[in-house]
Image (cartoon, rainbow, N blue to C red):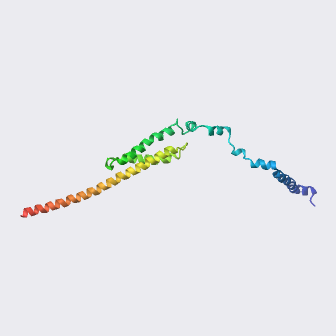
Amino acid sequence: MAPANNFFKAARPVMRQQLFGAQVRNAFRTSQLRAQFRESSKRWQSSSASAEDAQQSWFKRMWDSPIGLKTVHFWAPVMKWALVLAGVADFARPAEKLSLTQNGALTATGIIWTRWCLIIKPKNYLLAAVNFFLGAVGVVQCTRILLWQSAQKKNAGELVQDVKEEIKEDAKEAKAAVKA
């Protein structure tokens, strides 16, 4: 027969559960503990440093930001908008006066750097926006140039056909003049 000591060791968790389970249930039933859990936890409370940040002005936050007013991360995109505006102003120029090489370079720059601005740290959404629009303006200008070049090739083909027909007519007239 097994010693009684083994029986009591096996029964300890059951006894503990009955004793401590009642204590835990009673503890959660008390209003003091309930009130404690109803209050917001420390996890969601702000610290004094973030409270100071919330009270800072917009200018102060922009000045101290890693992409703020005193960094190249702010001024480079601001100045790059001049390229976008110049490209938009070129919409009024005739396509034959535009450079495919230059606009192709602006398109490639805009597309490549738009992606890169979203990879680097800190992410610079202002620079990504200006590069996106630079790429868009470049695509529009390249499309205009290529459509104009295509139209010129068609016009050149038609012009060659017209010249051939005129030469044939002149040849016929010359033959008729020689026979007469």
Looking at the image, which residue is at 42% across and 43% down?
A: 83
- Which corner quadrant holds the N terminus? bottom right
Looking at the image, which residue is at 90% across and 56% down?
A: 8
* Image: 152 above or below 90: below
Q: Is residue 75 visible?
A: yes
Residue farthest along the left direction in this orientation: 180
Residue 19 percent coordinates (x, y): 87, 54
- In screen coordinates, is 67 left or right of 162? right
- Which corner quadrant holds the C terminus? bottom left
- In screen coordinates, is 25 left or right of 126? right
Residue 115 percent coordinates (x, y): 49, 48
Q: Is residue 100 visible?
A: no
* Image: 92 above or below 65: below
Residue 116 percent coordinates (x, y): 50, 46
- In screen coordinates, is 7 left or right of 137? right
- In screen coordinates, is 102 left or right of 49? left
